[in-house]
Amino acid sequence: MAKAHAPKAAQSVPINGSPEQNAYMEDIEKQFIIDKDQLTAIKDHFIVEMEKGLNKDKQTMVMIPSYVEGRLTGQEQGHYLALDLGGTNLRVVLVTLEGHGKFKTVSTKARVSEELKTGPMRDLCDYIADCIDTFLTEQNLSNVDEDLPLGYTFSFPVLQSKINRGILTTWTKGFNCTGAVGKDPVLLLQDALLRKHIPVKITALVNDTVGTLLSNAYQKPDTVAGLILGTGSNGAYIEQMAKIGKWKEGPTTASEMVINMEFGAFDNERVILPVTRFDNKLDRKSINPHFQIFEKLISGMYLGEIVRNVITDMMDRNLLFGQPGQNTEAISGHYQFETSFMSSIESDTSADLSTVRDILDTNLNLTNVDDVELRIVKRICELVGTRASRLAAAAIAGIALHTKVDRKGADIGIDGSLYEFYPSFEDRIYQGIAELMPDYADDIQNIVRLGLARDGSGVGAALTACVADKMLKSK
């Protein structure tokens, strides 16, 4: 789906509603539009919070050292494996690096049964080992001379202590295997691989944002950061060791390390973000109230619900969908207004807004909607979607300024459905970055080079295994 170009100003087609509707929409605009001064203050606070997290433990933005040292050159070669465990499916990927930024991938998926998700950890590890074994046999790699390095994307809360060591603190996402919490998932799986004589060595425990950075960096060596802008949001970037004040682990093999920012928690204290009552309602009813506030304002999981909160508030004031017999049951349900609806609604440039009408009718049983109501719904989507992209711009500009990006420019890899599919999202991000980096505004797209970096948990994890292998050999 091609990205549409951003409207240059926040204001779009006039609503032309009743005086009450117009007044309500004017008030909403004031709450959701972030002007240049406000955006600058957010970016400045973001940089301050980055520096706090680099120098002290237990800060809001935790700035976790990933133990991934140095950079990729794009000339690396060889076979590397990736394992992605984090939901219903388990994925094994073979990445063959060919140098010159080129690589090939082959992968397989296997289902993780409910029984395995809640049974003994040993059973889950044996099952994973068998899947890897079958895959290697299919790829004629079961009799290699040297163990194949594997990057393990283990998408659960882990306290990492080395590039290939960590402790599982708690299970999430419906997993609850016994004998795993408080233990190292790498050692548990490596034990199963050894028992079954499978020629694989787990060299890296990987965070998907770090993987996104590396999958971009193999093709673009000037990459400084990787972001996830999808269902959730996070960022990772390359930092100078000298700036990581809290590092106590002694000498490293390189002068730089990738930092997993965990920026979804930025401003949990509510010091600077323009949080509205609609965001507060979403936050109160979420599974993690008062946490991840930045993520809740910029991620695909939440944007549709913020729009729904505005719509239902208007309904409560008899400003929307109040026709006799109108069926409002569907839109009254939590998370029934999906972010994908916003995408399609913002793409509708027709004079009669036929797509908006169709979405409301097909997905939410809202019939006989009048033209004013269609314009209102579209405008609410624009306001919430634009705010999200501008806040993402504040984070990206913060990273670019902190890492001292100059006229030479830098690449930033981004993965996630919001960035990939939401119309105008990238254009609006650029618009925001240009406001925040005025010295480079004339050429912003060549200086902060955003690009889609798919598959951080697959290709990125294999590349992390490659970096880990290099680090091991250089020690």
Image: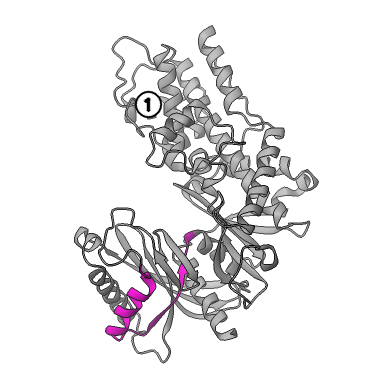
Residue density around tag 1, few if under 14, some if 14–19, many if 20 or more, within 10 Å? many
Residue at the top extreme of this rendering: 19
Q: Residue at x 29, y 23 (%)?
A: 329
Would you identify the image quadrant in which residue 63 lies? Answer: bottom right
**Left or right of 340 on screen, residue 17:** right
Query: Dot 1 corresponds to which residue?
Result: 360
**Amino acid residing under circle 1:** Leu
Locate residue 203, reporting x and y percent.
46, 77
- Please provide the residue range marked out in magenta: 183-208
Residue 194 in the image, given as x and y percentages of width and height: 32, 84
Residue 408 lies in what quarter of the image?
bottom right
Q: Is residue 265 left or right of residue 157?
A: right
**289 sits left or right of 28 in the view:** left
* Relative image position of residue 278 (x, y in whole percent): 47, 27
Identify the residue at the far left of this view: 115
Q: Is residue 453 magenta?
A: no
